[in-house]
Image: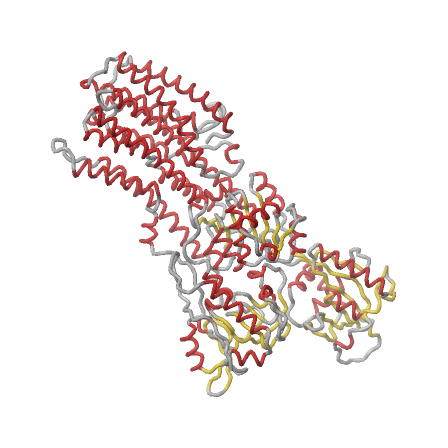
Amino acid sequence: MAFLRLPEIRPTRRRAGGSDRTPRGAVAEATRNALIDISRVSVQRTYGLLDCSPDGLDRDDARRRLAQHGANEVSHDRPAPAVLQFLAAFRNPFILILLFLSVVMFCTDVLFADPADGPDLTGVITVSVMVLVSATLRFWQEYRSSRAAEQLKAMVRTTTAVTRVRSGVPVTAEVPLADVVPGDLVQLAAGDMIPADVRFVRVKDLQVNQAMLTGESLPAEKTADPQEALAPAELLEARNLGFMGTSVVSGSGTAVVVATGERSWFGSMARTIVGARPETAFDQGIKRVTRTLITFMLIMVPVVFVINAITKDWITAFLFGVTTAVGLTPEMLPLVVTAGLAKGSAFMAKRKVIVKRLNAIQNLGAMDVLATDKTGTLTEDRIVLERHVDVNGDASERTLSFAALTSTFQTGLRNLLDAAVLRAVGDEGVERLQSTHTLVDEVPFDFERRRMSVVVDDGFGRLLVTKGAVEEVLACSAGETVDGRDTALTDARRAELEEYVAGENALGMRVLAVAVRSFDGEEDREYGAADEKDLTLVGFLSFLDPPKATAGAAIESLRGHGVAVKVITGDNPLVAAAVCTEIGIDADRLALGSDTEGLSLRELGELAEQVDVFAKVNPAQKARIVESMRENGHTVGFLGDGINDAPALRTADVGISVDTAVDIAKESADIILLAKDLTVLEGGVIEGRRTFVNTMKYISMTASSNFGNMFSVLVASALLPFIPMIPLVVLVQNLAYDLSMLTLPWDRVDEEDVAQPRAWRADALARFMVRIGPISSIFDITTFALMWFVFQANAPEHAAFFQSGWFVESIISQTLIVHMLRTARLPFVRSRASLPVLLATGAVCVFGVLLPFSGWGAVLGLVPLPWSYFPFLVLTLLAYCVVTQVAKRLFIRRYGVWI
């Protein structure tokens, strides 16, 4: 006999980036083929293929299979140990640059220091502290968030009812989920989670919630019959298969396990999302900015070194070259970025949002496309009775009352539709029906008839009330109630009623029919399906998973902030189109998952530009649609909570899930919402943009200012017989300025700066540096002239005086100009910095003026300046502000943007 074979793999838990020796595509394909094969054969053939029996496996066979197939567990990323997470925090381009510079400074200032001066650890310690504080902040924030996310994991049942042979007798007992093996016989009832991929061999009114896999709101009806015509693309729609992670809504059944662990459909999907994550927009942007700054450094440092080597000595040239490299590096960038992200994370935590990965905040701000699942995000994730009408399509309380009789008096487990009917009639209505009617008998629902009936006594006689699928109820009906009179149901009327139902279906409704039959004067007897004939049609019930009240406004608000919303759902196109139309998403041109097959990423990206709704999409197609939009230049967020959303969450620039999501979705996400509502995201988007803008303020202002300073150094190096500034003083100036910049995450941001998505643009940074940076050099050169010609600091013996004069002008202009550059508006008048920024920059200016007069200043090599210097300083600063404001207006007029 040929038994079913699956690839031999052992499920293991791996950390992110772990190796995977089994081809993931091969496992998924083998799982699909095995499930399709098993669904097409009879129950008896199923037992044969799985080498098991209707009595279950014996203990030895189960133990052998567990050793062969491994535990029934799936792969998932888990947080690395704290030590590895801490080391990973240093894996940042700017931190690596600073570490390199600290090594160079250690060599120059300590190992090869002038014996007369002795080793100087000031620079090494300063840079090292910056690196350590930045890395520690980033580590702690992400470590704390990851722990919070782990605590959000849902509690699930850890056992399932399995029938196995003990002492020759089949016994059903609870078995740990991890011990379930292929061939096990599983007993399922309402509320049970399906522990593996299974083939149903016996069912009784079994309905399974597969929303986390398919996106369908309504439960799927299951059968034990073979599905001989099942196509591979319809695997998840197989009526005789159940999938790991789904749950039983109603009814009961027996199933034989086909695939466990990583061989299951869920497991094969989990294997595709563990390991290294794709680069996000933040990762790519920070790399481009790093390359830009390094390029400037690689150009400026050698030039400064060569010029100083020619005009001075080689040792001085080397030291000043290192100083130039330090001066060009925005040392506090890692700390400013981390502080900004941590502030954003704290802001979002107050709004019930957990940020698992700090970089996701800026990706959220850069996001210009939000792709979202439909069920539970745009809709309430619950079925409601939208309409109850008579045969004319008019609202009818009579139809509702008859429907409520079936839902009230049935003795089986009520499904979601019954619950919706009872909510519509209300508790008082149910009590009224119970007081005026008594149950005589019932004809339970089954999947062959697709209807159910109750027989009640209303005090005047017996009444059979039937509720079920429209085509089945119509087939049993001979008449209809029109305007209170019973009339014959003609073929023409049947066609009209079917057209009405088709219209409701087109609106995404699920429609049931309600019909009645009177049995006057009958004595007690049993009623059955044979009595469901010659019915009189009363009306119809239309059910819908309604859109959330806040969905339309949230989508409109996101659009107003430059974020397009795309719906990517596994649900059917009629339901998707109806819901999307109601909340303001254009569903006129809707694409199916099958439409995306065979398209290249470029072609799929072009399709996504034209289509806002994708329906009947499988998990791989979801991820590919997201990838195509990223390839097309968009920064894409994806919001989902099901197993079928995990690959797309992983592929997106920012994956967003909810705390009620399945574990695999939460592990794939960057951000977890404690409220499943799009309105929560709006605040996150704005905070992400605020964080980005304040970060770019620092990068742009510091890089352009440093570039201007180094350009000034280049000029001074070529013209002066001494170095224009003491290397250690350059470090002190940078440190003082950068410390003041640590307040930037708390700075105000102009409304227009957060109105649209913001992305990292290295070309814009380079343009800003080249055009704005040299402005400071103009006034540096005028200061050189002032010190050289007016104050006669034109010889090596007057170098300290010259260097002190330039230091004061340089540090004050660099700090004061922050207020000019932080906004596109007129500073202090139309846009004022936050109080922390005002205080910090003011303190640095005072520090710059006083340092030459202090003892520490003397140690650094600075000397006091005459009071006659300061009027010239004020004029220089005023002119600098005016020229910068003019240059800013010209820059904005030409390029349309500022920072």
Can see residue 846?
A: yes
Q: Report the residue at 85% width, 66% height from top.
A: 489
Q: Quadrant of residue 60?
A: bottom left
Q: Quadrant of residue 694?
A: top left
Instruction: Please give left or right for residue 429 compared with residue 94 in the image.
Output: right
Q: Quadrant of residue 230?
A: bottom right
> Eyeballing the image, is 125 above or below 802?
below
Q: Position of residue 280 (x, y in %)?
A: 45, 47
Q: Report the residue at 48% width, 23% height from top.
A: 890
Instruction: Please give left or right for residue 423 compared with residue 498 in the image.
Output: left
Residue furthest to the bottom: 168
Which sits in the foreground, 769 or 467?
769
Residue furthest to the left: 116
Which sits in the foreground, 714 or 794?
714
Q: Report the residue at 52% width, 60% height from top.
A: 643
Can see residue 249?
A: no
Tag count: 0
Q: Position of residue 157 (x, y in %)?
A: 49, 67
Instruction: Please give left or right for residue 375 compared with residue 344 in the image.
Output: right
> Eyeballing the image, is 133 above or below 578?
above
Q: Position of residue 699 (x, y in %)?
A: 39, 34
Q: Position of residue 119 (x, y in %)?
A: 16, 36
